[in-house]
Image (tube, rainbow, N blue to C red):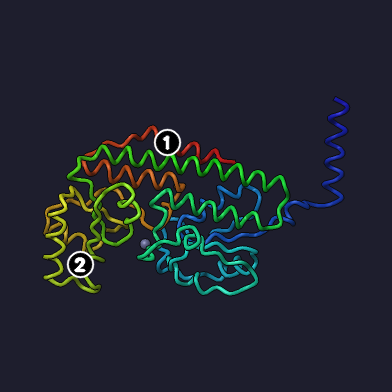
Protein backbone atom coordinates (compact mmCIF):
# COMPACT_ATOMS: atom_id res chain seq x y z
CA UNK A 1 0.00 0.00 0.00
CA UNK A 2 2.69 2.40 1.08
CA UNK A 3 4.82 1.50 -1.91
CA UNK A 4 2.09 2.14 -4.52
CA UNK A 5 1.20 5.49 -2.93
CA UNK A 6 4.84 6.47 -3.20
CA UNK A 7 4.90 5.47 -6.88
CA UNK A 8 1.79 7.51 -7.63
CA UNK A 9 3.31 10.49 -5.80
CA UNK A 10 6.51 10.12 -7.82
CA UNK A 11 4.49 10.01 -11.05
CA UNK A 12 2.57 13.13 -10.12
CA UNK A 13 5.77 14.95 -9.23
CA UNK A 14 7.30 14.10 -12.62
CA UNK A 15 4.13 15.25 -14.34
CA UNK A 16 4.20 18.56 -12.49
CA UNK A 17 7.86 19.18 -13.18
CA UNK A 18 7.42 18.67 -16.91
CA UNK A 19 3.83 19.22 -18.12
CA UNK A 20 2.67 16.63 -20.70
CA UNK A 21 6.08 15.95 -22.29
CA UNK A 22 4.71 13.09 -24.41
CA UNK A 23 1.97 15.29 -25.89
CA UNK A 24 4.41 17.96 -26.95
CA UNK A 25 6.50 15.34 -28.74
CA UNK A 26 3.66 13.64 -30.65
CA UNK A 27 4.24 14.25 -34.38
CA UNK A 28 1.31 15.69 -36.34
CA UNK A 29 0.12 13.71 -39.36
CA UNK A 30 -2.56 14.62 -41.89
CA UNK A 31 -4.55 11.80 -43.53
CA UNK A 32 -6.07 13.15 -46.72
CA UNK A 33 -8.65 11.40 -48.82
CA UNK A 34 -10.21 8.02 -49.45
CA UNK A 35 -9.97 5.50 -46.62
CA UNK A 36 -6.73 6.96 -45.25
CA UNK A 37 -8.40 8.62 -42.27
CA UNK A 38 -9.55 5.39 -40.66
CA UNK A 39 -6.60 3.37 -41.93
CA UNK A 40 -3.99 5.81 -40.59
CA UNK A 41 -5.76 6.35 -37.24
CA UNK A 42 -6.12 2.61 -36.72
CA UNK A 43 -2.47 1.98 -37.54
CA UNK A 44 -1.12 4.96 -35.63
CA UNK A 45 -2.98 4.50 -32.34
CA UNK A 46 -1.50 7.09 -30.00
CA UNK A 47 1.89 7.18 -31.71
CA UNK A 48 1.03 10.27 -33.77
CA UNK A 49 -1.64 12.95 -33.81
CA UNK A 50 -3.68 12.16 -36.96
CA UNK A 51 -5.88 14.89 -38.48
CA UNK A 52 -8.32 13.91 -41.20
CA UNK A 53 -9.29 16.16 -44.10
CA UNK A 54 -12.21 14.84 -46.12
CA UNK A 55 -15.25 13.87 -44.05
CA UNK A 56 -16.70 10.36 -44.51
CA UNK A 57 -19.28 10.24 -47.30
CA UNK A 58 -17.95 13.44 -48.92
CA UNK A 59 -16.92 13.38 -52.56
CA UNK A 60 -13.11 13.65 -52.69
CA UNK A 61 -13.10 14.26 -56.46
CA UNK A 62 -14.52 17.77 -55.95
CA UNK A 63 -13.52 18.54 -52.37
CA UNK A 64 -11.95 21.96 -51.84
CA UNK A 65 -9.62 22.46 -48.86
CA UNK A 66 -10.92 24.74 -46.10
CA UNK A 67 -8.67 27.25 -44.25
CA UNK A 68 -8.72 24.85 -41.25
CA UNK A 69 -7.52 22.02 -43.52
CA UNK A 70 -4.68 24.22 -44.77
CA UNK A 71 -3.68 25.04 -41.18
CA UNK A 72 -3.62 21.34 -40.25
CA UNK A 73 -1.50 20.62 -43.31
CA UNK A 74 1.04 23.35 -42.63
CA UNK A 75 1.36 22.26 -38.97
CA UNK A 76 2.04 18.64 -39.85
CA UNK A 77 5.23 16.68 -40.42
CA UNK A 78 3.68 14.14 -42.73
CA UNK A 79 0.79 14.37 -45.21
CA UNK A 80 -0.65 11.14 -46.56
CA UNK A 81 -2.87 11.27 -49.64
CA UNK A 82 -4.44 8.53 -51.77
CA UNK A 83 -2.86 9.72 -55.02
CA UNK A 84 -3.92 8.91 -58.58
CA UNK A 85 -5.65 12.28 -58.49
CA UNK A 86 -8.49 11.15 -56.19
CA UNK A 87 -8.56 14.69 -54.82
CA UNK A 88 -6.95 17.15 -57.25
CA UNK A 89 -6.44 19.89 -54.64
CA UNK A 90 -4.25 17.55 -52.56
CA UNK A 91 -1.81 16.84 -55.34
CA UNK A 92 -0.68 20.47 -55.43
CA UNK A 93 0.41 20.87 -51.80
CA UNK A 94 3.62 22.60 -50.93
CA UNK A 95 5.20 23.08 -47.51
CA UNK A 96 7.57 21.92 -44.84
CA UNK A 97 6.29 18.35 -44.58
CA UNK A 98 6.71 15.07 -46.33
CA UNK A 99 3.92 14.35 -48.83
CA UNK A 100 3.30 10.71 -49.72
CA UNK A 101 0.81 9.47 -52.32
CA UNK A 102 0.17 6.22 -50.46
CA UNK A 103 -1.84 4.50 -53.19
CA UNK A 104 0.70 5.29 -55.91
CA UNK A 105 3.52 3.85 -53.81
CA UNK A 106 1.48 0.81 -52.71
CA UNK A 107 0.00 -0.06 -56.12
CA UNK A 108 2.38 1.21 -58.81
CA UNK A 109 0.96 -1.16 -61.42
CA UNK A 110 -2.36 0.57 -62.19
CA UNK A 111 -2.74 1.03 -65.97
CA UNK A 112 -6.00 3.05 -65.74
CA UNK A 113 -4.66 5.13 -62.83
CA UNK A 114 -7.88 4.23 -61.04
CA UNK A 115 -7.79 5.89 -57.59
CA UNK A 116 -10.44 3.57 -56.07
CA UNK A 117 -7.82 1.11 -54.87
CA UNK A 118 -9.35 0.16 -51.54
CA UNK A 119 -12.06 -2.06 -53.06
CA UNK A 120 -9.40 -4.75 -53.17
CA UNK A 121 -8.26 -5.55 -49.61
CA UNK A 122 -4.91 -6.60 -51.11
CA UNK A 123 -4.40 -2.97 -52.20
CA UNK A 124 -5.52 -1.69 -48.80
CA UNK A 125 -3.00 -4.02 -47.15
CA UNK A 126 -0.23 -2.65 -49.37
CA UNK A 127 -1.36 0.88 -48.41
CA UNK A 128 -1.21 -0.05 -44.72
CA UNK A 129 2.42 -1.08 -45.18
CA UNK A 130 3.27 2.25 -46.84
CA UNK A 131 1.53 4.18 -44.04
CA UNK A 132 3.43 2.28 -41.34
CA UNK A 133 6.77 2.76 -43.13
CA UNK A 134 6.08 6.52 -43.22
CA UNK A 135 5.02 6.68 -39.56
CA UNK A 136 8.16 4.75 -38.53
CA UNK A 137 10.28 7.59 -39.98
CA UNK A 138 8.76 10.13 -37.57
CA UNK A 139 10.43 10.99 -34.25
CA UNK A 140 8.60 8.49 -32.02
CA UNK A 141 10.01 6.31 -29.25
CA UNK A 142 10.95 2.62 -29.50
CA UNK A 143 7.83 1.51 -27.65
CA UNK A 144 5.59 3.35 -30.15
CA UNK A 145 7.53 1.78 -33.03
CA UNK A 146 6.91 -1.69 -31.59
CA UNK A 147 3.21 -0.92 -31.14
CA UNK A 148 3.01 0.27 -34.76
CA UNK A 149 4.42 -3.05 -35.92
CA UNK A 150 1.92 -4.96 -33.81
CA UNK A 151 -1.02 -2.97 -35.18
CA UNK A 152 0.29 -3.39 -38.72
CA UNK A 153 0.27 -7.20 -38.32
CA UNK A 154 -3.25 -7.07 -36.92
CA UNK A 155 -4.55 -4.83 -39.70
CA UNK A 156 -2.97 -6.95 -42.43
CA UNK A 157 -4.51 -10.11 -40.93
CA UNK A 158 -7.98 -8.54 -40.81
CA UNK A 159 -7.70 -7.30 -44.41
CA UNK A 160 -6.64 -10.78 -45.52
CA UNK A 161 -9.69 -12.24 -43.80
CA UNK A 162 -11.91 -9.54 -45.36
CA UNK A 163 -10.62 -10.67 -48.75
CA UNK A 164 -11.56 -14.30 -48.00
CA UNK A 165 -14.91 -13.20 -46.57
CA UNK A 166 -15.69 -11.12 -49.70
CA UNK A 167 -14.92 -14.08 -51.92
CA UNK A 168 -17.18 -16.37 -49.88
CA UNK A 169 -20.10 -13.91 -49.99
CA UNK A 170 -19.81 -13.34 -53.72
CA UNK A 171 -19.73 -17.09 -54.37
CA UNK A 172 -23.33 -17.21 -53.07
CA UNK A 173 -24.55 -15.03 -56.00
CA UNK A 174 -25.91 -17.10 -58.91
CA UNK A 175 -23.26 -16.87 -61.67
CA UNK A 176 -25.58 -14.98 -64.05
CA UNK A 177 -26.02 -12.13 -61.59
CA UNK A 178 -22.36 -11.66 -60.62
CA UNK A 179 -22.30 -8.14 -61.97
CA UNK A 180 -22.10 -4.68 -60.44
CA UNK A 181 -23.91 -1.97 -62.40
CA UNK A 182 -23.07 1.53 -61.16
CA UNK A 183 -22.92 4.98 -62.71
CA UNK A 184 -19.19 5.52 -62.56
CA UNK A 185 -16.01 3.57 -63.09
CA UNK A 186 -15.19 3.06 -59.42
CA UNK A 187 -15.50 -0.63 -58.60
CA UNK A 188 -13.09 -2.25 -61.04
CA UNK A 189 -10.69 -3.37 -58.30
CA UNK A 190 -13.59 -5.09 -56.54
CA UNK A 191 -15.12 -6.76 -59.58
CA UNK A 192 -11.72 -7.77 -61.01
CA UNK A 193 -10.61 -9.32 -57.73
CA UNK A 194 -13.76 -11.37 -57.25
CA UNK A 195 -14.53 -12.42 -60.81
CA UNK A 196 -17.53 -10.15 -61.30
CA UNK A 197 -18.52 -8.08 -64.31
CA UNK A 198 -18.75 -4.30 -64.01
CA UNK A 199 -20.92 -1.96 -66.04
CA UNK A 200 -20.17 1.71 -65.44
CA UNK A 201 -23.26 3.13 -67.12
CA UNK A 202 -22.18 6.73 -67.51
CA UNK A 203 -18.41 6.37 -67.89
CA UNK A 204 -18.72 3.52 -70.39
CA UNK A 205 -21.46 4.92 -72.63
CA UNK A 206 -21.87 8.69 -72.23
CA UNK A 207 -19.62 11.68 -72.56
CA UNK A 208 -21.13 13.95 -69.91
CA UNK A 209 -23.94 16.49 -69.97
CA UNK A 210 -27.49 15.41 -70.77
CA UNK A 211 -27.84 11.82 -71.83
CA UNK A 212 -28.49 11.62 -75.58
CA UNK A 213 -31.19 9.16 -76.77
CA UNK A 214 -28.53 7.06 -78.50
CA UNK A 215 -26.52 6.85 -75.26
CA UNK A 216 -29.61 5.91 -73.28
CA UNK A 217 -30.32 3.13 -75.79
CA UNK A 218 -26.74 1.83 -75.58
CA UNK A 219 -26.79 1.91 -71.77
CA UNK A 220 -30.18 0.20 -71.62
CA UNK A 221 -28.99 -2.58 -73.90
CA UNK A 222 -25.82 -3.12 -71.87
CA UNK A 223 -27.74 -3.15 -68.58
CA UNK A 224 -30.28 -5.66 -69.87
CA UNK A 225 -27.54 -7.86 -71.33
CA UNK A 226 -25.67 -7.80 -68.01
CA UNK A 227 -28.53 -9.72 -66.32
CA UNK A 228 -28.21 -7.54 -63.24
CA UNK A 229 -31.21 -7.54 -60.95
CA UNK A 230 -30.72 -3.92 -59.82
CA UNK A 231 -28.80 -0.68 -60.43
CA UNK A 232 -26.47 0.39 -57.60
CA UNK A 233 -26.55 4.09 -56.66
CA UNK A 234 -23.43 5.81 -55.26
CA UNK A 235 -25.27 8.73 -53.68
CA UNK A 236 -28.69 9.87 -52.51
CA UNK A 237 -30.73 11.48 -53.90
CA UNK A 238 -30.42 9.16 -56.87
CA UNK A 239 -29.54 11.05 -60.06
CA UNK A 240 -32.16 11.78 -62.73
CA UNK A 241 -30.00 9.84 -65.18
CA UNK A 242 -30.15 6.72 -63.05
CA UNK A 243 -33.93 7.05 -62.74
CA UNK A 244 -34.23 7.32 -66.52
CA UNK A 245 -32.12 4.20 -66.99
CA UNK A 246 -34.18 2.38 -64.37
CA UNK A 247 -37.41 3.31 -66.20
CA UNK A 248 -36.08 2.34 -69.61
CA UNK A 249 -34.67 -1.02 -68.46
CA UNK A 250 -37.27 -1.97 -65.86
CA UNK A 251 -34.41 -2.62 -63.38
CA UNK A 252 -35.08 -1.25 -59.89
CA UNK A 253 -32.58 0.93 -58.05
CA UNK A 254 -30.99 -0.78 -55.01
CA UNK A 255 -32.20 0.57 -51.67
CA UNK A 256 -28.70 0.81 -50.20
CA UNK A 257 -25.75 2.81 -51.48
CA UNK A 258 -22.43 1.39 -52.51
CA UNK A 259 -19.67 3.71 -51.25
CA UNK A 260 -17.11 4.27 -53.97
CA UNK A 261 -14.63 6.78 -52.61
CA UNK A 262 -14.12 6.20 -48.91
CA UNK A 263 -15.77 5.30 -45.64
CA UNK A 264 -19.50 5.87 -45.07
CA UNK A 265 -20.55 8.42 -42.42
CA UNK A 266 -20.11 6.91 -38.95
CA UNK A 267 -18.65 3.69 -40.32
CA UNK A 268 -15.15 2.26 -40.29
CA UNK A 269 -13.28 1.03 -43.34
CA UNK A 270 -14.26 -2.57 -42.54
CA UNK A 271 -17.92 -1.69 -41.87
CA UNK A 272 -18.10 0.22 -45.16
CA UNK A 273 -16.40 -2.55 -47.14
CA UNK A 274 -18.58 -5.33 -45.69
CA UNK A 275 -21.71 -3.23 -46.12
CA UNK A 276 -20.83 -2.61 -49.79
CA UNK A 277 -20.33 -6.34 -50.32
CA UNK A 278 -23.59 -7.26 -48.55
CA UNK A 279 -25.50 -4.63 -50.55
CA UNK A 280 -24.29 -6.19 -53.80
CA UNK A 281 -24.61 -9.81 -52.70
CA UNK A 282 -28.11 -9.56 -51.22
CA UNK A 283 -29.50 -7.50 -54.11
CA UNK A 284 -28.13 -9.95 -56.70
CA UNK A 285 -29.71 -13.03 -55.16
CA UNK A 286 -26.87 -14.21 -52.90
CA UNK A 287 -26.90 -14.35 -49.14
CA UNK A 288 -24.51 -12.28 -47.07
CA UNK A 289 -23.23 -13.56 -43.72
CA UNK A 290 -23.81 -10.55 -41.47
CA UNK A 291 -22.59 -12.23 -38.27
CA UNK A 292 -19.11 -12.90 -39.67
CA UNK A 293 -19.00 -9.33 -41.05
CA UNK A 294 -19.61 -8.09 -37.52
CA UNK A 295 -16.79 -10.25 -36.18
CA UNK A 296 -14.39 -8.66 -38.69
CA UNK A 297 -15.61 -5.25 -37.61
CA UNK A 298 -15.10 -6.07 -33.92
CA UNK A 299 -11.53 -7.17 -34.60
CA UNK A 300 -10.90 -3.90 -36.45
CA UNK A 301 -12.22 -1.70 -33.65
CA UNK A 302 -10.19 -3.74 -31.13
CA UNK A 303 -6.87 -2.94 -32.84
CA UNK A 304 -4.80 -0.96 -30.36
ZN1 LIG B 1 -14.72 8.10 -57.09
Q: In terms of depth relative to the viewer, which is nearer, 235 or 46?
A: 46
Above or below — where is 90 with respect to 58? below
Coordinates of residue 81 in the picture (x, y in percent)? 51, 63
Q: Secondary structure at mark 1?
A: helix
- At x 41% / y 51%, what residue is drawn? 264
- At x 61% / y 59%, what residue is drawn? 29
> Quick one: label 2, few (<14), some, or many (20+) residues within 10 Å?
some
- At x 34% / y 49%, what residue is drawn? 193
Is any atom of residue 41 visible in this view?
A: yes
Q: Which residue is tagged 1?
A: 294
Q: Secondary structure at mark 2?
A: helix
Compared across the picture, whether 281 is left or right of 55 comes to left
Q: In terms of depth relative to the viewer, which is nearer, 86 or 154?
A: 154
Coordinates of residue 28 in the picture (x, y in percent)? 65, 59
Quadrant hosting residue 200: bottom left
Q: CA distance from mark 2 to mark 1?
A: 37 Å
Question: Count the marks: how many?
Answer: 2
Q: Which residue is tagged 2?
A: 205
Mark 2 or 1 closer to N-term? Answer: 2
**Is the shortest distance between ligand 1 and the CB of mark 1 under 8 Å?**
no
Amino acid sequence: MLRSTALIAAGLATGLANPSPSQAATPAVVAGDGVLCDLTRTLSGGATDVRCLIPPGADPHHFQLTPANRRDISNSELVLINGYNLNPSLSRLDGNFELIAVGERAVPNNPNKDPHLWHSPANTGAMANVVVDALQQLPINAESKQALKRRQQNVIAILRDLDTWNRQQISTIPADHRVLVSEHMAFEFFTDRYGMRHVAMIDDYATGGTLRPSSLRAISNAVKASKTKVLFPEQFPVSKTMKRISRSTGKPIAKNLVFADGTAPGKSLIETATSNTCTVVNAQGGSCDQASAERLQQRWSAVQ
